[in-house]
Amino acid sequence: MEDLNEIWTEKYRPKKIAELSGQKNIKERLQAFANEKSIPHLLFAGTAGIGKTTCALALAKEIYGDNWHKNFMETNASDERGINVVRTTIKDFARVKPFGAEFKIVFLDECDALTPEAQQALRRTMEKYTKTTRFILSCNYSSKLIPPIQSRCAIFRFRPLEDEDIKESLTKITKNEGLELTDSGTDAILAVAEGDMRKAVNTLQSVAITSKKITNDEVYSIAASLRPEEVKEILELALNNQFMESRKKLANIMLVRGLSGIDVIKGLHKQIIEIDIDETKKAILIDKLGEYEFRIVEGGTEDLQMEAFLAQVSTLSN
């Protein structure tokens, strides 16, 4: 096994557009831009860990070659979300002449965190320096960006990765690192990752530090995540009018794993969809689950709110 001090998400980050996992349609369009050595302003929208930053880096490397870092600036709006980051950092880079190229690229990650004033300043900067600078904006929610910015960009909407795409990458990494990835371990990582490649690779590396054999027990222990069968058992106990037993099992799991109420709610939501009960009951439970998530987010005591939810489940027992 190689040095585990190196972060695998960076070690195995694709360097070319063709090497990216999933996102077939997006890859084809970006490859066409790379072949032409020209791009419009781009907007990458989607959840975390599905390839937005990797696509921006790969695109820059294919356009500029070895000099990509001289014409590429990456900044994160979560670090500085005010207007000054646009007026100083971004504008200073944009006004400098490109190095051996027609234009430079500014990659602004998490741009939906920018204040409305900063977004207006960014819009003006994109207009003023469009001949020498292209912007690649990355965000989780494109609706949080003002319409003038959205209209100036070609929008790419990234989807969570398919399990097969993540599995292919995990197999490659485990083979290269000399690990044994069991089928149960693979299924557990896929369940924990939920389409997030970064989370999948980080989970794999975390388990690999303590064991060369990747099993579901190791994964769920490291990921501090609820097993589907555990959640199903808790729900079924509550639905069968065994509230105290259901409450006891959930409390023990939360204490042992250190899970938050939100973690538990995510696990419950998946199982409510899959559990074999009447559709009307599923609708009622999901409605209640949303209510208790809101209460927790607003500051409610997590264990008390989860117990209250289980009590609601028990009232639906046959």
Image (cartoon, rainbow, N blue to C red):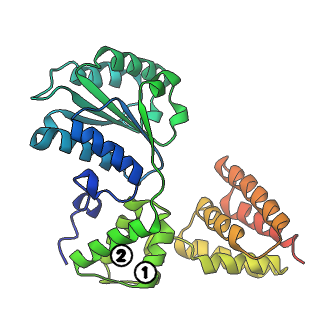
| Quadrant (top left, top right, bottom left, bottom right) of the C terminus | bottom right
Please name the residue that numbered disc 2 is placed on. Answer: 207
User: What amino acid type is highlighted by mark number 2?
Assistant: Val
Q: Nearer the viewer, mark 2 or mark 1?
A: 1
Label 1, secondary structure: give it: helix
Number of numbered tags placed on the structure image: 2
Q: Nearer the viewer, residue 34 or 237?
A: 34
User: What amino acid type is highlighted by mark number 1?
Assistant: Gly
Q: Image check: 27 left or right of 175?
A: right
Q: Image check: 176 left or right of 160?
A: left
Residue drawn at (32%, 75%), measured in percent from left and top?
171
Residue drawn at (28%, 73%), measured in percent from left and top?
172
| Quadrant (top left, top right, bottom left, bottom right) of the N terminus | bottom left
Please name the residue that numbered disc 1 is placed on. Answer: 185
Q: Residues within 10 Å of mark 1 (few under 14, many from 20)?
A: many
Residue drawn at (67%, 67%), measured in percent from left and top?
268
Quadrant in the rendering for residue 304: bottom right
Question: Which of pointers 2 and 1 lies earlier in the amino acid sequence?
Answer: 1
Q: How far across and how far down the image is residue 314, in percent?
A: 84, 72
Quadrant in the rendering for residue 169: bottom left
Proximity of marks 2 and 1: CB atoms separated by less than 8 Å:
yes
Name above or below for residue 103 compared with residue 125.
below
Q: Image check: 140 left or right of 280?
A: left
Q: How far across and how far down the image is residue 84, in percent?
A: 35, 21
